[in-house]
Amino acid sequence: MSTSPIQNQLTELQQEAVQAITTTDNLDNLEQFRIKYLGKKGQLSQILRGMGKLSPEERPQVGALANEVKEAIQGKLDNQKAALEKTQIETQIKAETLDVTMPGVSRPLGKVHPLNGVVDRVLDIFVGLGYTVATGPQVESDYYNFEALNTPADHPARDMQDTFYLPGGNLLRTHTSSVQIRYMENNEPPIRIIAPGRVYRRDTVDATHSAVFNQLELLAVDKGLKFTDLKGTIKEFLQRMFGDELPVQFRTSYFPFTEPSAEVDVQWKGKWLEVMGCGMVDPNVLKAVGYDPEVYSGFAAGFGVERFAMVLHQIDDIRRLYNSDLRFLTQF
Ligand code: 2NL
Protein backbone atom coordinates (compact mmCIF):
# COMPACT_ATOMS: atom_id res chain seq x y z
CA MET A 1 0.00 0.00 0.00
CA SER A 2 1.44 3.33 -1.07
CA THR A 3 1.28 6.40 1.15
CA SER A 4 -0.89 9.26 -0.04
CA PRO A 5 0.45 12.86 -0.19
CA ILE A 6 -1.79 13.76 2.72
CA GLN A 7 -0.15 11.07 4.86
CA ASN A 8 3.28 12.47 3.96
CA GLN A 9 2.08 15.92 4.89
CA LEU A 10 0.92 14.61 8.25
CA THR A 11 4.22 12.87 9.14
CA GLU A 12 6.17 15.94 8.00
CA LEU A 13 3.98 18.12 10.16
CA GLN A 14 4.63 15.86 13.16
CA GLN A 15 8.39 16.00 12.61
CA GLU A 16 8.47 19.75 12.20
CA ALA A 17 6.20 20.38 15.20
CA VAL A 18 8.10 18.01 17.52
CA GLN A 19 11.40 19.61 16.52
CA ALA A 20 10.05 23.14 17.06
CA ILE A 21 8.43 22.31 20.41
CA THR A 22 11.40 20.50 21.97
CA THR A 23 13.76 23.37 21.16
CA THR A 24 11.44 26.02 22.59
CA ASP A 25 12.60 27.53 25.86
CA ASN A 26 9.73 29.80 26.65
CA LEU A 27 6.08 29.32 27.47
CA ASP A 28 4.77 32.10 25.24
CA ASN A 29 6.44 30.61 22.15
CA LEU A 30 5.05 27.21 23.15
CA GLU A 31 1.51 28.60 23.06
CA GLN A 32 2.24 30.15 19.65
CA PHE A 33 3.29 26.73 18.40
CA ARG A 34 0.10 25.12 19.78
CA ILE A 35 -1.97 27.62 17.83
CA LYS A 36 0.20 27.22 14.74
CA TYR A 37 -0.02 23.40 14.63
CA LEU A 38 -3.17 22.37 16.48
CA GLY A 39 -5.31 25.51 16.52
CA LYS A 40 -8.66 25.80 14.71
CA LYS A 41 -6.93 27.50 11.76
CA GLY A 42 -3.69 25.62 12.39
CA GLN A 43 -1.69 23.45 10.04
CA LEU A 44 -3.30 20.14 11.11
CA SER A 45 -6.79 21.48 10.42
CA GLN A 46 -5.62 22.78 7.09
CA ILE A 47 -4.24 19.39 6.06
CA LEU A 48 -7.40 17.60 7.19
CA ARG A 49 -9.50 19.90 5.06
CA GLY A 50 -8.08 17.91 2.09
CA MET A 51 -9.65 14.69 3.44
CA GLY A 52 -12.78 15.25 1.44
CA LYS A 53 -10.93 14.34 -1.72
CA LEU A 54 -9.87 10.94 -0.33
CA SER A 55 -11.42 7.62 -1.29
CA PRO A 56 -13.64 5.90 1.32
CA GLU A 57 -10.90 3.24 1.88
CA GLU A 58 -8.18 5.82 2.54
CA ARG A 59 -10.24 7.94 4.87
CA PRO A 60 -10.10 5.79 8.05
CA GLN A 61 -6.34 5.24 7.65
CA VAL A 62 -5.63 8.93 7.23
CA GLY A 63 -8.05 9.69 10.07
CA ALA A 64 -6.18 7.31 12.36
CA LEU A 65 -2.80 8.82 11.37
CA ALA A 66 -4.15 12.32 11.93
CA ASN A 67 -5.15 11.35 15.45
CA GLU A 68 -1.73 9.88 16.16
CA VAL A 69 -0.06 13.03 14.86
CA LYS A 70 -2.35 15.21 16.91
CA GLU A 71 -1.72 13.21 20.08
CA ALA A 72 2.01 13.12 19.47
CA ILE A 73 2.16 16.89 19.07
CA GLN A 74 -0.16 17.50 22.04
CA GLY A 75 1.94 15.11 24.14
CA LYS A 76 5.12 16.97 23.24
CA LEU A 77 3.43 20.29 24.03
CA ASP A 78 2.35 19.01 27.45
CA ASN A 79 5.79 17.61 28.28
CA GLN A 80 7.60 20.74 27.20
CA LYS A 81 5.14 22.93 29.07
CA ALA A 82 5.63 20.93 32.28
CA ALA A 83 9.42 21.06 31.85
CA LEU A 84 9.47 24.80 31.21
CA GLU A 85 7.18 25.52 34.16
CA LYS A 86 9.42 23.44 36.40
CA THR A 87 12.59 25.33 35.41
CA GLN A 88 10.74 28.62 35.74
CA ILE A 89 9.73 27.79 39.32
CA GLU A 90 13.23 26.59 40.11
CA THR A 91 14.85 29.82 38.90
CA GLN A 92 12.26 31.82 40.79
CA ILE A 93 12.92 29.90 43.99
CA LYS A 94 16.65 30.40 43.51
CA ALA A 95 16.24 34.13 42.92
CA GLU A 96 13.91 34.62 45.88
CA THR A 97 15.80 32.49 48.37
CA LEU A 98 16.35 34.29 51.67
CA ASP A 99 19.68 33.47 53.25
CA VAL A 100 18.86 33.72 56.91
CA THR A 101 22.52 33.18 57.79
CA MET A 102 23.67 36.27 55.84
CA PRO A 103 24.94 39.07 58.12
CA GLY A 104 22.57 42.07 58.16
CA VAL A 105 23.40 45.68 57.34
CA SER A 106 24.99 46.84 60.58
CA ARG A 107 23.97 50.18 62.07
CA PRO A 108 26.12 51.16 65.02
CA LEU A 109 24.02 52.17 68.00
CA GLY A 110 23.96 55.95 68.49
CA LYS A 111 24.89 57.59 71.77
CA VAL A 112 23.79 60.70 73.61
CA HIS A 113 26.32 63.53 73.21
CA PRO A 114 28.00 64.32 76.57
CA LEU A 115 26.55 67.86 76.47
CA ASN A 116 23.01 66.58 75.92
CA GLY A 117 23.66 63.94 78.58
CA VAL A 118 24.37 66.70 81.13
CA VAL A 119 21.33 68.74 80.02
CA ASP A 120 19.07 65.66 80.24
CA ARG A 121 20.25 64.80 83.75
CA VAL A 122 19.95 68.38 85.03
CA LEU A 123 16.46 68.84 83.59
CA ASP A 124 15.40 65.50 85.10
CA ILE A 125 16.56 66.60 88.55
CA PHE A 126 14.86 70.00 88.41
CA VAL A 127 11.64 68.71 86.86
CA GLY A 128 11.64 66.27 89.79
CA LEU A 129 11.90 69.27 92.13
CA GLY A 130 8.83 70.89 90.51
CA TYR A 131 10.55 73.17 87.98
CA THR A 132 9.21 73.93 84.49
CA VAL A 133 11.52 74.02 81.45
CA ALA A 134 11.47 77.41 79.67
CA THR A 135 13.09 78.40 76.39
CA GLY A 136 13.35 81.60 74.34
CA PRO A 137 15.05 83.37 71.41
CA GLN A 138 18.82 83.45 70.88
CA VAL A 139 18.58 86.84 69.17
CA GLU A 140 17.64 89.28 71.92
CA SER A 141 17.13 92.96 72.49
CA ASP A 142 19.49 94.92 74.73
CA TYR A 143 16.58 95.26 77.16
CA TYR A 144 15.98 91.54 77.81
CA ASN A 145 19.65 90.62 77.85
CA PHE A 146 20.98 93.54 79.95
CA GLU A 147 18.64 96.40 80.99
CA ALA A 148 16.02 94.24 82.71
CA LEU A 149 18.83 92.38 84.47
CA ASN A 150 20.06 95.49 86.29
CA THR A 151 22.90 95.93 83.78
CA PRO A 152 22.51 99.38 82.14
CA ALA A 153 24.66 100.44 79.19
CA ASP A 154 27.39 102.03 81.35
CA HIS A 155 27.66 99.07 83.76
CA PRO A 156 31.22 97.70 84.07
CA ALA A 157 29.87 94.12 84.05
CA ARG A 158 29.05 94.59 80.37
CA ASP A 159 32.77 94.28 79.52
CA MET A 160 32.81 90.64 80.61
CA GLN A 161 29.62 89.95 78.67
CA ASP A 162 30.53 91.55 75.38
CA THR A 163 28.77 89.72 72.58
CA PHE A 164 27.83 89.70 68.90
CA TYR A 165 25.77 92.74 67.89
CA LEU A 166 23.33 92.64 65.00
CA PRO A 167 22.18 95.50 62.74
CA GLY A 168 19.22 97.28 64.36
CA GLY A 169 20.49 97.02 67.92
CA ASN A 170 19.75 93.36 68.65
CA LEU A 171 22.38 90.97 69.91
CA LEU A 172 23.07 87.30 70.51
CA ARG A 173 22.10 86.58 74.12
CA THR A 174 24.96 86.18 76.61
CA HIS A 175 22.93 84.09 79.07
CA THR A 176 19.51 82.44 79.27
CA SER A 177 18.44 84.98 81.93
CA SER A 178 16.61 86.80 79.12
CA VAL A 179 14.32 83.75 78.85
CA GLN A 180 13.55 84.10 82.54
CA ILE A 181 12.75 87.82 82.22
CA ARG A 182 10.29 87.00 79.45
CA TYR A 183 8.76 84.22 81.55
CA MET A 184 8.34 86.50 84.59
CA GLU A 185 6.68 89.17 82.42
CA ASN A 186 4.03 86.63 81.43
CA ASN A 187 3.56 84.71 84.70
CA GLU A 188 2.80 85.61 88.30
CA PRO A 189 4.73 84.11 91.26
CA PRO A 190 5.19 81.51 92.57
CA ILE A 191 7.48 80.41 89.73
CA ARG A 192 10.11 77.67 89.42
CA ILE A 193 11.78 77.51 86.02
CA ILE A 194 14.89 76.09 84.41
CA ALA A 195 16.13 77.56 81.12
CA PRO A 196 18.59 75.60 78.97
CA GLY A 197 20.05 77.01 75.76
CA ARG A 198 22.85 78.23 73.56
CA VAL A 199 24.51 81.53 74.52
CA TYR A 200 27.22 83.74 72.99
CA ARG A 201 30.16 85.78 74.25
CA ARG A 202 32.99 87.70 72.68
CA ASP A 203 35.54 85.17 73.90
CA THR A 204 38.78 84.03 72.33
CA VAL A 205 38.63 80.28 71.90
CA ASP A 206 41.04 78.24 74.00
CA ALA A 207 40.95 75.01 76.00
CA THR A 208 38.35 76.37 78.43
CA HIS A 209 36.56 79.08 76.39
CA SER A 210 34.21 79.08 73.45
CA ALA A 211 32.35 82.03 71.88
CA VAL A 212 29.29 79.77 71.65
CA PHE A 213 28.38 77.57 74.58
CA ASN A 214 25.42 76.14 76.44
CA GLN A 215 23.98 77.39 79.68
CA LEU A 216 21.43 76.24 82.22
CA GLU A 217 19.84 78.74 84.55
CA LEU A 218 17.28 78.16 87.25
CA LEU A 219 15.04 80.68 88.90
CA ALA A 220 12.56 80.53 91.77
CA VAL A 221 10.37 83.45 92.89
CA ASP A 222 7.93 83.12 95.75
CA LYS A 223 6.95 84.67 99.07
CA GLY A 224 9.61 84.18 101.74
CA LEU A 225 12.44 82.58 99.74
CA LYS A 226 15.77 82.95 101.58
CA PHE A 227 19.44 82.26 100.90
CA THR A 228 19.08 78.92 102.77
CA ASP A 229 16.50 77.84 100.15
CA LEU A 230 19.06 78.61 97.44
CA LYS A 231 21.83 76.76 99.30
CA GLY A 232 19.64 73.72 99.95
CA THR A 233 18.48 73.55 96.33
CA ILE A 234 22.01 73.89 94.91
CA LYS A 235 23.49 71.38 97.34
CA GLU A 236 20.75 68.86 96.63
CA PHE A 237 21.23 69.32 92.89
CA LEU A 238 25.04 69.02 92.97
CA GLN A 239 24.97 65.93 95.16
CA ARG A 240 22.48 64.26 92.81
CA MET A 241 24.75 65.21 89.92
CA PHE A 242 28.17 64.31 91.38
CA GLY A 243 27.43 62.02 94.32
CA ASP A 244 25.89 61.98 97.80
CA GLU A 245 28.92 62.81 99.92
CA LEU A 246 30.21 65.59 97.64
CA PRO A 247 31.62 68.57 99.59
CA VAL A 248 30.07 71.84 98.35
CA GLN A 249 31.14 75.38 99.29
CA PHE A 250 29.73 78.85 98.58
CA ARG A 251 32.16 81.73 98.03
CA THR A 252 30.98 85.31 97.96
CA SER A 253 30.94 86.87 94.50
CA TYR A 254 29.23 89.51 92.38
CA PHE A 255 26.61 89.49 89.59
CA PRO A 256 24.62 92.62 88.61
CA PHE A 257 21.31 90.67 88.77
CA THR A 258 21.76 89.02 92.20
CA GLU A 259 22.43 90.36 95.70
CA PRO A 260 24.02 88.67 97.55
CA SER A 261 25.85 86.59 94.97
CA ALA A 262 28.04 83.52 95.31
CA GLU A 263 30.22 81.10 93.34
CA VAL A 264 29.72 77.44 94.11
CA ASP A 265 32.68 75.04 94.29
CA VAL A 266 32.66 71.26 94.58
CA GLN A 267 35.49 69.06 95.84
CA TRP A 268 36.00 66.67 92.96
CA LYS A 269 38.93 64.29 92.47
CA GLY A 270 40.78 66.00 95.36
CA LYS A 271 40.44 69.61 94.07
CA TRP A 272 38.00 72.46 94.70
CA LEU A 273 36.44 73.30 91.34
CA GLU A 274 34.15 76.25 90.59
CA VAL A 275 31.04 74.88 88.88
CA MET A 276 28.33 77.54 89.06
CA GLY A 277 27.22 81.01 90.11
CA CYS A 278 24.11 81.96 92.06
CA GLY A 279 22.44 84.53 94.27
CA MET A 280 19.23 86.13 95.52
CA VAL A 281 17.45 87.94 92.66
CA ASP A 282 18.21 91.66 92.85
CA PRO A 283 15.08 93.73 93.77
CA ASN A 284 15.65 95.84 90.64
CA VAL A 285 15.16 92.74 88.47
CA LEU A 286 11.88 91.91 90.26
CA LYS A 287 10.73 95.51 89.78
CA ALA A 288 11.60 95.42 86.05
CA VAL A 289 9.13 92.57 85.47
CA GLY A 290 6.43 94.13 87.67
CA TYR A 291 6.87 91.97 90.79
CA ASP A 292 6.76 93.76 94.16
CA PRO A 293 10.12 93.10 95.90
CA GLU A 294 8.46 93.85 99.26
CA VAL A 295 6.18 90.83 98.70
CA TYR A 296 8.33 88.45 96.70
CA SER A 297 11.91 87.28 96.80
CA GLY A 298 13.75 84.88 94.55
CA PHE A 299 16.94 82.97 93.97
CA ALA A 300 18.74 82.14 90.74
CA ALA A 301 21.74 80.15 89.60
CA GLY A 302 23.48 79.51 86.33
CA PHE A 303 26.24 77.35 84.94
CA GLY A 304 27.89 76.34 81.71
CA VAL A 305 26.96 72.90 80.41
CA GLU A 306 30.40 72.42 78.83
CA ARG A 307 32.18 73.19 82.09
CA PHE A 308 29.95 70.68 83.91
CA ALA A 309 30.62 68.00 81.31
CA MET A 310 34.36 68.68 81.48
CA VAL A 311 34.44 68.34 85.27
CA LEU A 312 32.21 65.25 85.29
CA HIS A 313 34.09 63.38 82.55
CA GLN A 314 37.58 64.89 83.10
CA ILE A 315 37.69 66.41 79.60
CA ASP A 316 40.80 68.59 79.11
CA ASP A 317 39.71 70.76 76.15
CA ILE A 318 36.28 72.30 75.51
CA ARG A 319 36.84 72.00 71.74
CA ARG A 320 36.64 68.20 71.95
CA LEU A 321 32.92 68.68 72.64
CA TYR A 322 32.39 70.37 69.27
CA ASN A 323 34.61 68.32 66.92
CA SER A 324 32.30 65.31 66.49
CA ASP A 325 35.28 62.94 66.66
CA LEU A 326 33.73 59.52 67.24
CA ARG A 327 36.88 58.20 68.94
CA PHE A 328 36.16 60.80 71.62
CA LEU A 329 32.36 60.74 71.63
CA THR A 330 31.95 56.94 71.86
CA GLN A 331 33.71 56.98 75.25
CA PHE A 332 30.68 58.38 77.06
C1 2NL B 1 27.11 81.72 85.81
C2 2NL B 1 26.24 82.42 86.75
C3 2NL B 1 24.02 83.14 87.15
C4 2NL B 1 21.83 84.04 87.40
C5 2NL B 1 22.79 83.39 86.64
C6 2NL B 1 19.64 85.15 87.13
C7 2NL B 1 18.54 85.27 86.34
C8 2NL B 1 17.56 86.16 86.66
C9 2NL B 1 17.67 86.92 87.78
C10 2NL B 1 18.78 86.78 88.54
CL1 2NL B 1 16.23 86.33 85.65
N1 2NL B 1 19.74 85.91 88.22
N2 2NL B 1 20.61 84.28 86.80
C11 2NL B 1 22.12 84.43 88.68
C12 2NL B 1 23.38 84.18 89.19
C13 2NL B 1 24.35 83.52 88.44
O1 2NL B 1 24.93 82.49 86.34
O2 2NL B 1 28.21 81.41 86.14
N3 2NL B 1 26.64 81.48 84.60
C14 2NL B 1 27.41 80.79 83.59
Image (cartoon, helix red, strand yellow):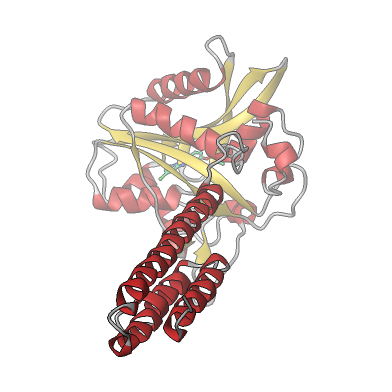
Can you tell which quarter of the image residue 320 is in?
top right
Of 44 and 85, which appears nearest the observer?
Answer: 44
Query: How many labels were placed on the picture?
Result: 0
Residue 231: x, y in percent?
A: 45, 22
Q: Which percent across, then down, holds residue 112?
A: 55, 37
Q: Residue at x 25, y 31 (%)?
A: 223
Identity of the residue furthest to the top in this view:
245
* Residue 10 in the image: above or below residue 203: below
Rendering coords of residue 100 (x, y %): 55, 35
In the picture, measured across the screen, residue 40 lies left or right of residue 107, that is left
Residue 21 left/right relative to 194: right
Q: Which residue is rendered at x = 38% and y = 79% of the image? A: 44
Q: Which image quadrant is residue 37 in? A: bottom left
Q: Nearer the viewer, residue 213 or 120?
A: 120
- Camera-nearest residue between 28 and 155: 28
Q: Is residue 53 visible?
A: yes
Task: Please indicate whether residue 283 sits to the left or right of residue 158 in the image.
Answer: left
Instruction: Please state which of residues 326 and 72 is positioned toward the viewer in this rendering.
Output: 72
Q: Residue at x 39, y 65 (%)?
A: 68
Residue 213: percent from left, percent from top: 60, 49
Q: Is residue 151 above or below residue 32?
A: above
Q: Quadrant of the C terminus?
A: top right
Say whether residue 146 is visible: no
